[in-house]
Amino acid sequence: MPSRLAAAEAVTRHRALVAAAWLAAAAALVPAALRVEERLEVSARPVGSESAEVDRILAERFGSPFARSAVLVASGVPGPTRPEGLAVLREVVASLAAAPGVTRTFSYLDQPDDFFAGTGGRGTFVVVGLDLAGGRPDELLPALRALTARLAAELGPRHPDARLRWTGETAINVDLWRTSTDEARAAERRALPLTLALLLLAFGSVAAALLPVLTGVLAVTFALGAAALVGERVSLAVLIVNVVSMLGLALGIDYALLTVSRFREARAGGADPAAAGAAAARYAGGTIVLSGAAVAIGFAALLLVPLNELRSAGLGGLLVVAVAVLLAATLLPGVLAWLGPRLEAGRFRRADEVRSAERWRSWARRVAAHPWRVLVLAGLPVLALAAQAARLQPRIPSGEWLPPGMESARAIRDLEAMGRGGVVDALRVVLELPEEGSALGREGWDAQRRLEDALRADPRVARVQSLRTLVGEGGEELARAALLPAWAKRSFLGEWGDAALLEVVPREGLSGVAVAGLVRELRGRDAPALTGVPGTRLRIGGLPAFHVDYEDAVAGRTPRVVGLVVGVTLLALFVAFRSILVPLKAVALNLLSVAGAFGALVLVFQDGWGVRWLGLAGPVDGVFPIVPVLVFCTVFGLSMDYEVFLVARVAEARRAGLGETEALAEGLARTGGVITSAAAIMIAVFAAFTLGDFVLVKMLGFALAVAVLLDATVIRVAIGPALLRLAGRRNWWPGG
């Protein structure tokens, strides 16, 4: 292709200009990458969800001081029903009331109820309203934590076991935000030495091994810088950091490995450095662009899901793929041409590439001689593993899946020890009355009472908090309600009296699945029949409702995402190879890789096989809903990398005049070593992300590592070649 040849020669001929352009990009992107965390949202929320609408209603129509709140848990102190415990509570509340960013507190001091005291008379908790209009939760919460740390130290002489810890949705999101970014950095530090060691084994040269590692680091840095610039205008979730770090290292190193291998191959054939750089840009660059397009298709499809986290992951994937492809196709060939023989600096062993290639040729010929036997022996175990994917449960896991070192997770355990663990999972039920109704009118008040009585009668509910509970039952309830302070009315009544809030605390020990069932059931109830007032409506918010909306947002768009990825990939491969069978085979094998990864997720995380090796105490009852769709989109593209690497070289050999069997042998001889080395590096990178405490990232890294392992060791070097051999000349129909 003359255009590709001209572009390849231009990249190497004008390498100084290309390098200058990248230096200019670095000047803009590196400083932005250093402040990327400042541009990311602390929390994720399904776009247009009912739980998000409840938050908006409480902030705008109620003006509630608790529209956004956190829970301060005081453990190791007497409960507020005892004089010394009441004194501690007054001291804590007085300090919080004077703290910037605190709108209001709600505790035993406002409602002398035993619910605010832990079982056994130990401990208490305070609901703290937060003013986030002028700042971010990650800016406000650290200051509050510093305040309560000083308070706990002051309480120490009187109560040596005193602990003041923050939890609730806002605190959990802030902690996950910080943990996610910290673990991404830690995973990078774990992955880089291991990938460097693998590259040293593959190349036998320090300089040749360092170049892909540096490319991977640049891919991550530049992509994070681009994300920071985008984050100034678009809301991005913190998951983008993990996606960019994980994929940037994997793809950046992978594409650089392919380019360096092609350069060394040209040099071994007698080409001078400039010609070898042009050959690397022409042949490796074309393959990288095609495989990068395949990866990008999957991430582009994630933008269809109305969930900030997945859209951020999709954008991060697109950015890092684009940067990795551009680095490998433009900057790297010029650097290789400039290095020339210096690429072999630090050589400590001579890799016998001829012998390695011959071993792959021999293997390809054996596959070609016995394709059906290879399909049975290699395919049946993978199919058995893939069959387990039918048991995958895509939902928020119950139990203790939060990183145990997070303060918010420790505070939840403190609440559970008090018998008040359901406080964090409280549902926020907004009762909207018809336009002419009033919550402080007789009809509206009776509607609240009927709804509250129905909720209290549910065995899954431990407590219902409302304006009626503040007033107390008995005669003249409406008259007493009118005398309540303004903050209490704003907390539980809409500004115009047309809506009321009921806080529903689930029963202690209720599973996440059961709480989610309660949310779905309430949303499905007939509000007029439940309240006795025509025209009423229920809206359900709170953390459990967010989880339900989260699951539904992913599940509702997954079929469309899968269909789009498969369809566009088929079209792209048909255009690239002018074949029908090659795209169909590639998609089928990709689906097999994905199913195998899902099957491994089920066996390890849901069934518990070896889960303790990954740092979990036991199995979980679900896989985070975004993991399957994110794994599908990522694996589909990554698997396509190896398919493109192999089939492109087989097609190249066929164009050179080799027969089907010899072309297969030549293609595998040229790519087998590259595929296995690249896969080993990807597995090392993804496995590094399984060693942290963030279970979502642990699942993601594990599934990706398993998918690449299956793809590189069984599918692309056994099943794929066997299918190519069986199809023979039909592989290239109708293009020829």
Image (cartoon, rainbow, N blue to C red):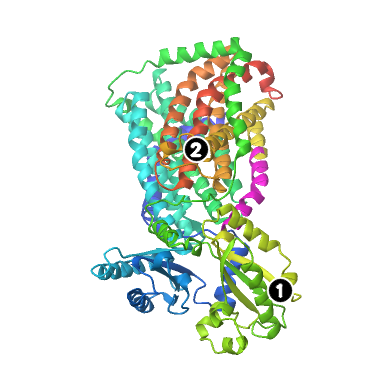
Question: x and y percent of residue 721 in the render?
Answer: 58, 19
Question: Would you name the residue on which mark 1 appears?
Answer: 531
Q: Earlier in the sequence, mark 2 or mark 1?
A: 1
Q: Nearer the viewer, residue 222 or 506?
A: 506
The three-letter amino acid code for the residue at tag 1 is Thr
Q: Nearer the viewer, residue 422 or 71?
A: 422
Is the C terminus in the top left, top right, bottom left or bottom right quadrant? Answer: top right
Residue 713 vertical placement versus 433 (above, below): above
> Is residue 557 within the magenta segment?
yes
Question: x and y percent of residue 435 in the render?
Answer: 72, 80
Place residue 639 in its image quadrant.
top right
Local SS, label 1: helix
Q: Nearer the viewer, residue 477 or 648?
A: 477
Is the Cβ of the residue at disc 2 closer than 8 Å to that at disc 1? no
The three-letter amino acid code for the residue at tag 2 is Gly
Range of the magenta residues?
547-566
Q: Residue at x 49, y 37 (%)?
A: 608
Residue 118 vertical placement versus 433 (above, below): above
Q: Residue at x 63, y 56 (%)?
A: 517
State the count of labels.
2
Place residue 577 in its image quadrant.
top right
